[in-house]
C-alpha cells in the first residue's frame, strides 16, 4: 500500500501534535541557569557578553572606569585601533569613497598609501565577474522571495566553480574572501532582479559593474534601470556600508564565522553560515522593522510635529497596542551601547543632507522627534539596568528608503558590508590556528531504565 504524500510545505495536525511534544521536551526551568551559573546566550544576568575569544580587528567601547568604577559613556567604534569617526571624516574631507580603503585596513591592519589603495582597488575590481553562465544557470533558476536565501545559495554554489575550494591556506582564503567581497553586490542585486521579474512581472535588468566606479556607486549602477544616481546618494551609501562592515567579534554572525572556521571547513560554507545568522530578524532585519513601524506611525499620527501625538503612539508600541504588538520601539536600544551608538551619530548628519536633497525634511523631523522622545518614554515605563539610545538601524532603513532600495535588499546590503568583517575574522581565526570552538552545555537529564515496546504507556 503506497504511503500518502503530503505537500512539501504542509503542516499537518500530526506535525502540530509532535511539535507540541518537542516543545515540552525542550523547555528548561530558567532557575536552573542561575543554579548552575550558566551564561545563557553567552551573556551574564546584566546582558554583558561572556569573553569567548580575543580579536585585533575592532573594538566597541561603551564604558569607562571612573574612580575604579565602570560607568556608561558615549559609545565609540574602532577599526584596527582607528576611531571610525576619524576614518569617515578623513576620506570625506578628501571627497573620496571609503569602502575600499577601510576594507584594506580591516584585512591587513594598516591604512594603505595612495599606491597600495590604487592596486588594491584594481585587484577588487578584477574579481567583479561571475563565472560563465552563472547568472543564467544559478541565479535565474528557482528565484527566491528572500534575497538572503538567494545569496547563501549562490555562495555555496560558487564552491563548485573553485578548483581550490577546500584549501584553507591563508593566501587561498584571502583570494576567496576578496572574490566574495567583490561579488556580493552582484549576487544580491541580480537575485533581486530575478525575483522582481519572475514573481512581480517587472522588467529584467542585468547591468554589468563598471570598473572605474566605487563599490557604492556600482551597487546603485547595477540596481537602477537607468544606472543613474547623485553623488550624495553614492556617498551616503558608502558611509552606510562602512558603518556596517564590522562590530567587534561578539556579534552573532562574526562569532558564527569564528565557530565554523575553527572546524577548518571551506570559506564558502563559513560565509553561508554567517549569512544564515545575519538573515535572522534579531540580527540583520531590524532596519526593516523600523521602516514598517514608521510607516504605520505616519498613518496613525495626523500631525508628525505634535509631540503629544507622537508620544501617544510610542506609548501604544510599548503597551503592545500598535504595530506588531511586540512591546518594542524598533531602532531604540542596543546590547552594548547605553548612552549613544557612534554609528548612528556619524550617520545622522549624512541622513539629514540626503533628506534635504530628496525633499523629505518632514520625515527626518519625525525621526528626530522619535529619537528624542523614545528613550525618555522607555526609561519612564520600564526598569532598565543601563541607558537606552537609538542604534544604527534607526536611520539606516530610512536611508535605504530614500535611496529607493527595495526592502528585499535591506539585509543583503548589510551582508555586502559585513562580508568584510567576516573575512577579517576568518583570517584571524585561521592565523591563530586554534582548536575547534566547542562550548560546554551542562546536561540536566536524569537516567532512565529502558522499557520494552509492549510495556510502554501511551
Image (cartoon, rainbow, N blue to C red):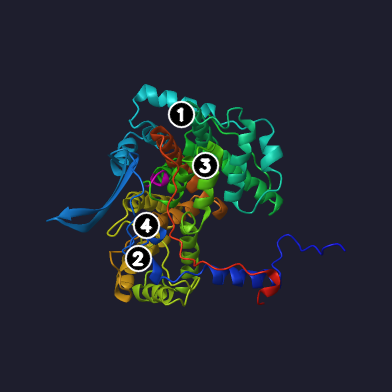
Sequence-wise first label, 1 or 2:
1
Q: Quadrant of the N terminus?
A: bottom right
Between marks 1 and 3, how big is the CA–CA gap? 15 Å
**Figure check: 116 above or below 323:** above
* Residue 248 position in % (x across, y down): 36, 46
For the record, the magenta segment spans 243-247
Which mark sits nearer the N-terminus, 1 or 3? Answer: 1
Circle 2 residue: 369
Residue denoted by label 1 = 170
Q: Which residue is mark 3?
A: 270
Residue 421 at x, y percent in the picture: 42, 41
Badge 1: residue crowd in 10 Å (few <14, some 14–19, many ≥20): some
Q: Nearer the viewer, mark 3 or mark 4?
A: 3
Label 2 vs label 3, nearer the camera: 3
Give the percent coordinates (x, y) of residue 329: 41, 67
Identify the element where label 4 is drawn: loop
The residue that disc 4 covers is 391
Amino acid at each position: 500500500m503506497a504511503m500518502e504524500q503530503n505537500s512539501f510545505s504542509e503542516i499537518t495536525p500530526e506535525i502540530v501534535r509532535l511539535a507540541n511534544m518537542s516543545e515540552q521536551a525542550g523547555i528548561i526551568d530558567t532557575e536552573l541557569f542561575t543554579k548552575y551559573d550558566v551564561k545563557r546566550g553567552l551573556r551574564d544576568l546584566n546582558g554583558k557578553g561572556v569573553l569567548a575569544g580575543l580579536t585585533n580587528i575592532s573594538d566597541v567601547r561603551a564604558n569607562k572606569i571612573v574612580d575604579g568604577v565602570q560607568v556608561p559613556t558615549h559609545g565609540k567604534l574602532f577599526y584596527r585601533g582607528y576611531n571610525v569617526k576619524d576614518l569617515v571624516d578623513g576620506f570625506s574631507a578628501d571627497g573620496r569613497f571609503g569602502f575600499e580603503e577601510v576594507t584594506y585596513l580591516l584585512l591587513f591592519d594598516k591604512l594603505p598609501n595612495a599606491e597600495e589603495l590604487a592596486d588594491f582597488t584594481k585587484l577588487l575590481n578584477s574579481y567583479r565577474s561571475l563565472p560563465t553562465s552563472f547568472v543564467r544557470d544559478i541565479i535565474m533558476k528557482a528565484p527566491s522571495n528572500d534575497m538572503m536565501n538567494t545569496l547563501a545559495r549562490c555562495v555555496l554554489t560558487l564552491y563548485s566553480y573553485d578548483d581550490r575550494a577546500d584549501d584553507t591556506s591563508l593566501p587561498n582564503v584571502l583570494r576567496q574572501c576578496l572574490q566574495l567581497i567583490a561579488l556580493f553586490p552582484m549576487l544580491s542585486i541580480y537575485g533581486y532582479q530575478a525575483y522582481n521579474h519572475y514573481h512581480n512581472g517587472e522588467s529584467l535588468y542585468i547591468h554589468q559593474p563598471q570598473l572605474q566606479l566605487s563599490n557604492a556607486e556600482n551597487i546603485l549602477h547595477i540596481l537602477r534601470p537607468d544606472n543613474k544616481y547623485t553623488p550624495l546618494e553614492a556617498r551616503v551609501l558608502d558611509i552606510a556600508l562602512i558603518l556596517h562592515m564590522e562590530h567587534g567579534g561578539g556579534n552573532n554572525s562574526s562569532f558564527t564565522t569564528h565557530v565554523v572556521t575553527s572546524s577548518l571547513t571551506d570559506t564558502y560554507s563559513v560565509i553561508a553560515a554567517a549569512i544564515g545568522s545575519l538573515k535572522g530578524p534579531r540580527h540583520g532585519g531590524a532596519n526593516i522593522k523600523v521602516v514598517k513601524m514608521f510607516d504605520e506611525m505616519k498613518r496613525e499620527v495626523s500631525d508628525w510635529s505634535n509631540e503629544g501625538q507622537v508620544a501617544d503612539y510610542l506609548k501604544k508600541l510599548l503597551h503592545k497596542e500598535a504595530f506588531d504588538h511586540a512591546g518594542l520601539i524598533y531602532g531604540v536600544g542596543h546590547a552594548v551601547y547605553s548612552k549613544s551608538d557612534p554609528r548612528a551619530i556619524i550617520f545622522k548628519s549624512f541622513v539629514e543632507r540626503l533628506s534635504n536633497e530628496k525633499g523629505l525634511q518632514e520625515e527626518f523631523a519625525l525621526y528626530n522627534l522619535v529619537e528624542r522622545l523614545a528613550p525618555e518614554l522607555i526609561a519612564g515605563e520600564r526598569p532598565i539596568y543601563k541607558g537606552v539610545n537609538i542604534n544604527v538601524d534607526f536611520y539606516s532603513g530610512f536611508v535605504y528608503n530614500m535611496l529607493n532600495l527595495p526592502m528585499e535588499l535591506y539585509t543583503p546590503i548589510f551582508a555586502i558590508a559585513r562580508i568584510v568583517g567576516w573575512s577579517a575574522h576568518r583570517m584571524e581565526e585561521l592565523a591563530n590556528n586554534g582548536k575547534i570552538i566547542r562550548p560546554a552545555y551542562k546536561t540536566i537529564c536524569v537516567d532512565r531504565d529502558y522499557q520494552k515496546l509492549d510495556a510502554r504507556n501511551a
